[in-house]
Image (cartoon, coloured by chain):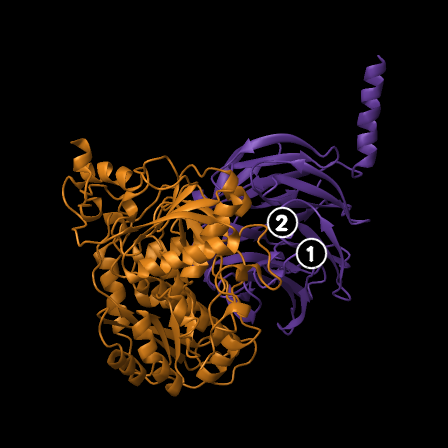
Amino acid sequence: MQRRACALAIVATGFMAGPASAYMAYVSNEKDNTMTVVDTATMQVVKTVNVGQRPRGITISHDGKHIYLCASDDDSIEVIDTASLEIVDTLPSGPDPELFVLSPDGKTLYVANEDDNLVTVIDIEGKKVLAEIPVGVEPEGMGVSPDGKTMVNTSETTNMAHFIDTSTHEITDNVLVDARPRFVEFTPDGKQAWVSAEIGGTVSVIDNQTREVVQKITFEVAGLRPESIQPVGVRITADGKKAYVALGPANRVAVVNTQTYEVEKYVLVGQRVWQLAFTPDQKTIISTNGVSNDITFIDVATDEPVQSVTVGALPWGVVVSPK
Amino acid sequence: MRDRTFLGLNTAIRSIAVRASRHGTKADVRSPLTGFDKICGSAKLITGTLTSRRSDNNRTLAQERVILSMTSAVPGTLAAFLCFFSLTVNVPGAQAQEATGKPPTATAKPEKKLTEIKIGYLRAYAPQLALSVLDVPPRDEGVAGGNVAIADNNTTGSFLGQKFSLDVTEVKPDADAVPAFQDLIAKGNRYVVADLSARQLLSIADLARDDGVLIFNAGATDDSLREEQCRASIYHTIPTRSMLADGLAQYLIWKQWRRWVLIHGSHERDQLFAEALRRAATRFGGEIVGEKLFEDTGTARRTDSGVVQIQRQMPVFTQDLPEHDVLLVADESEVFGTYVPFRTWIPRPVAGTAGLTPSAWHPASEQWGGTQIQNRFAKASGRRMLSKDMAAWTAVRILGEAATRTQGADPRKMADFIRSDDFSIAAFKGQKLTFRKWNQQLRQPIFLGDGRSVVSTSPQEGFLHQLSELDTLGVDEPETKCVLK
C-alpha cells in the first residue's frame, strides 16, 4: 500500500518536473531502420516502430495526423499514421531522399535528393511529383519562408544556398556559404535564412531581401579542436530571440542571441548532435545525438539539459507532434 | 626431405592461381554516360541500386560495430571508360578566359558568357601486374576521380557561368614527361593534375613555375618531393609514405601492439616505405624487433597452382623472426606482400602494404557523407573509388572551389586563394582539409582498411598537436627540410 503511494508520488513528481503538457516526439534512427516514439512529458520511450531502410529526414503534418519520413535507401517517403503508428502510405520522392520541408499550407513537400542534384516538389494529396529542380552537388538542407513564397536548398559540395521561387520552381539566387551547408532555418518573421556549414564550422545569416550574407556566426569551445565544431541543425524560437545550433561531434548545442549574433551558451548533450526540434509550447528543445544513441531534452527557459533518453541506433532527425 | 622443399625460399616464391571472382558482380551500370553534357549541367544521372544499408556513423561507432553488410561492388566496364576517355580528349582547345567581374550572388540564368577553366591531367601509365587480380589497378585509376570532380565543378559552375574541362595525356612511366607537359600548356591548361614518378614531376616543376602553372600531385607518395626536393609549383593532394606509415603506427600503438617485425621488398619504393615505418616506430613508441628482406628474383606473379608452394614457403620464411605483436610488410612492388597474411609461422596480424593497410581513401568508406561521393563515382565510372581517384578528385575540386570563391578564372587570383588562410576543402574525411604552408602537402586523415571495410581512421584519439592533430601524420614543420623555390 505504502509502495503504491510512493509510486504514485513519483509519477506525479515526474509529471510536474517535466514539460507542462504531453506531446509525442518521433525520432528517426538511421542505423536500425526504426522510429522511436517518446512521450515528452514522462520522457519515456512509448514505442519503437519498424520503418523503411535508412530513415533520416522526418516531419509531421500540421494537423499532427501523419508523419512523413525519408526512407533514403528505399527511395521513398513513408507516411505514418500517428494514431496507429502504422505505415499507411508512401509518396514518390525521387532517389535517396534525405531531408525535406513541408510548405506552410501543409500541401507540398520539398525534398532534397542527394544522389541526383535535384529538389523534388511533391503534391501530398495527389501523391505526385510537381517539379524537379536541378540544384548544386549533394542537395541537403531544406527551408521554406513562413509566407511559403521562398524555398531554400543547400548543396553540400557546391557550397551554396539556392533560393527558389515556389510559384515558378525556378532558382532566383545562389548564395555562396561555407563548406558543406547542411540545414536552413528561416526566422519567424521571414526576414532571414540561417544556413549551417558543417565543415566550414559556421552559420551564415542571409538577408531574404538582398539575398546576401549579413553575418557569419562562428563557434569556439575551450578545449575542443576547431575541426570538431560542425554545425548542422538550426532552430529558432517562435519569438525569434534565440537560435539553437547543433554542433555535431562537438557534442554541444550552441544558444545564439539572434540580435547580437553572440553565442550565449554551449549546452553539453550527447555525442554527434545533428538535429533539433521544439515542443509546440516552446518550453523544450530536443536534440538527436547519433553516436550515443540518445536524445537530450533541453529546457528553453534555462538552457540546461534536463534528461537524455536512449532511443534506437544512430538517431538522425526528430519532430514533435503539434498537439 | 620435407625441409628441403622449403629451401631457397628467397628465390622460389612462384606464384599463384588467382581464381577469385570479383565480389558482387551484378552488372548494374546502365550506360552511365548517357548524355554526358547533361552531367556537366545538372549531373542528373540514372540511378543505380548500390548499397542496401548505409549510415553516416562516425569513427567511434565504426570501431565498435561490425559492419554487417557491404553488398555492392560494381564491375568496371570498358564502355564506361571509353566514354569518359573520349570526353576528356575531345575538350575543345579554346583559350582560357580571364575572369569577368561577378556580383557576389550570381543568378541562375546562365545566359551570360561562360568562363572556361582548363585543367590538364598528365599521367605515367603502363599496365601493372599484381599478386591478386583484385589489386590490378583499373585502367582509369585517378582519371575517373578527376572526371567526377569536373562534373561536380560544372554543376556548381552552371550557377556561376563557369565551365571546367579535363585534358588527359599519358606517357610511359620511364618516359620524358616534358614534351607532354609543354603540349598541355600550349593548349591553354593553366593547371595540371599529375600522376607521375618523382623524377618526372621534378622535370616539369621548374617549367611550371616559369609559366605560372600549378601542378597538383595526385600520384607520388615520395616524402622527398615535400622535403629536400620540394617545389613551389607543386601542391600535393596524395599523402606521403610517412603520413601513411604514421597513420598505421598510431593505430597499432592505440591497440597496444607495440612489438613489430618488418619484412620489406628489395625495390626502391619498398625500401622507402620500410624507412617510413621505421620512422613511425621511433616517433610513436613502437619497436621493430626484427627485419627481413624479401628479395625479388624476378618470378612470375601469376602461375597455376602456385598457392600450394606459397602455403609451405611463407611459414618457413617467417619462422626465425623474433617474438612480435604485428608483422609489418613493405612491398609496394607487389612481389610477396599479399602472400603474408594467414601464412605466417605464428598467428599474428599483418599490416603495411598487406593486411591492415593505410590509404588516402577506402572504397568502402561511407562516413562523413562518403556514401554520396561513392555512389556518384560508382555510377560514373562503373567501379569503386580508390585512393588515387580521391586524390585527383580533390585536386580538381580544389580548383573548382578556388574558381567559386574568387568568382572567376584568373589563375593568379585562384593561386592566391589556394595559398591563403581562407582556403580549405571538404573531401568526405570528416573535417576541412588545408595545405601545409611549409611544403604544400594537403593535411588529411588516413584510412586504415583491410580490403573489405574501414577499420579506423587516423589520427587516433590522444595523439595531440599544438596546431592541428592532422600534423601528427608525416613530417611536421619543425622537422621539414623543405625550402620552397
Q: Chain of mark 1?
A: A
Tell which of B418 and A185 is nearer to you.
B418
Whole-number angstrom distance, CA of label 2 to CA of label 1: 23 Å
Task: Give the residue furthest to the left.
Answer: B304
Q: In which quadrant will I find the N terminus of chain B?
A: top left
* Residue B249 appears left or right of A199: left
Quarter assignment of residue B306: top left
* Mark 1 lies on residue: A223
- Judged by depth in the image, the label closer to the viewer, 2 or 1, is 1
Q: In the rendering, at what x and y percent does residue B366 appear?
A: 45, 49
- Chain of the residue that carries numbered disc 2 in the rendered image: A
Where residue B59 sits in the image (x, y, percent)?
A: 52, 47
Crowdedness near tag 2: few (<14), some (14–19) or many (≥20) residues, C-alpha within 10 Å: many
Could you say which quadrant of the image residue B71 lies in?
A: top left
Residue A246, relative to residue B36: is it above or below? above
Above-or-below relation of B365 to A163:
above
Q: Mark 2 = which residue?
A: A275
> Judging from the image, what secondary structure is the residue with disc 1 in?
loop
Q: Label 1 crowding class (10 Å Cα cut-off): few <14, some 14-19, many 20+?
A: few
- Residue beneath the point at 71% across and 48% down: A268
Q: Is residue B44 visible?
A: no
B236 and A125: which is toward the camera: B236
- The vertical placement of B316 against B296, above or below, is above
The amino acid type, in three-letter code, at marker 1 is Gly
